[in-house]
Image (spheres, rainbow, N blue to C red):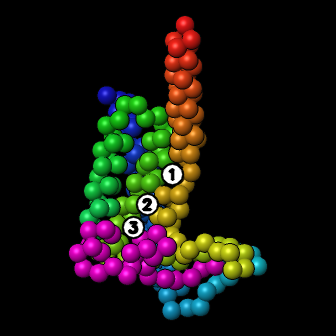
């Protein structure tokens, strides 16, 4: 029971920290950057640029209207986030690294969907790159989601390696049984 309580505490702590950091940074960006020209740092590698994004990642879906916009950018993400929350809480096979990664994804997702539901879009304000090779404009919630995804890469690679190894072992056993 103590392990479960500790797990819930860690999940909620990371989720709330991600939401707080994202919402505070969006508040700052709105107060300081809105209506201002881009602010450039490190020889234009990093830019503060205020944008209100009514779509998803890289403004995808911002052109959609009506029911599709509502379902794709509001209903579907809420369902996915609820599913992810219950998976994180209930899963017994998830290690701490995965729990932290999924909690970061959940926190970033909740913060962005909160803005979409309340304000119709999210505030994005960070951009990085060299010359014309640049990222899209993003926010702290997006950073949390990407960190969580990158944290999952070793697990995904390890998992695909297991599948490949199992597949090779199965093929070997089939060859041996056919030869024998």
Is the N terminus in the top left, top right, bottom left or bottom right quadrant? top left
- Please report the residue visible at 55 percent of the width from the left and 7 percent of the height from the top: 180
Dot 3 crowding, Cα within 10 Å, few <14, some 14–19, many 20+:
many
Q: Which residues are magenta?
A: 47-73
Above or below, comparing residue 32 to residue 178 in the picture: below
Disc 1 element: helix
Residue 112: give its label: 3
Q: Which one is nearer the viewer's eye here, 138 or 24?
A: 138
Residue 165: give its label: none
The reply to whether discs 3 and 2 touch (Cβ–Cβ < 8 Å) is: yes
Q: Is residue 72 magenta?
A: yes
Q: Position of residue 114 (x, y in %)?
A: 33, 68
- The residue pinned by badge 2 equals 108
Please count the marks in the image. 3
Question: Which mark is first along the chain, 2 or 1?
Answer: 2
Q: Is residue 67 magenta?
A: yes
Q: Position of residue 129 (x, y in %)?
A: 68, 73
Q: Which one is nearer the viewer's eye here, 6 or 124?
A: 124
The reply to whether discs 1 and 2 touch (Cβ–Cβ < 8 Å) is: yes
Disc 3 element: helix
Q: CA distance from mark 1 to mark 2?
A: 9 Å
Q: Which one is nearer the viewer's eye here, 112 or 134?
A: 134
Res 17 seen here? no
């Amino acid at each position: 029971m103590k392990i479960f309580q500790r797990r819930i505490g860690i999940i909620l702590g990371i989720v709330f920290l991600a939401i707080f950091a994202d919402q505070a940074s969006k508040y700052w960006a709105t107060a300081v950057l809105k209506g201002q020209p881009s602010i450039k740092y490190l020889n234009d590698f990093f830019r503060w640029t205020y944008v209100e994004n009514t779509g998803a990642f890289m403004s995808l879906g911002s052109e959609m209207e009506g029911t599709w916009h509502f379902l794709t950018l509001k209903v579907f993400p809420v369902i996915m986030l609820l599913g992810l929350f219950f998976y994180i809480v209930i899963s017994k096979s998830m290690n701490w690294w995965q729990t932290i990664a999924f909690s970061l994804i959940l926190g970033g997702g909740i913060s962005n969907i909160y803005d979409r539901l309340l304000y119709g879009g999210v505030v994005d304000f960070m951009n990085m790159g060299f010359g014309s090779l640049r990222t899209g404009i993003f926010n702290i919630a997006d950073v949390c989601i990407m960190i969580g995804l990158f944290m999952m890469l070793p697990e995904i690679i390890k998992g695909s390696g297991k599948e490949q190894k199992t597949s090779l072992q199965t093929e070997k056993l089939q060859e041996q049984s056919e030869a024998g």
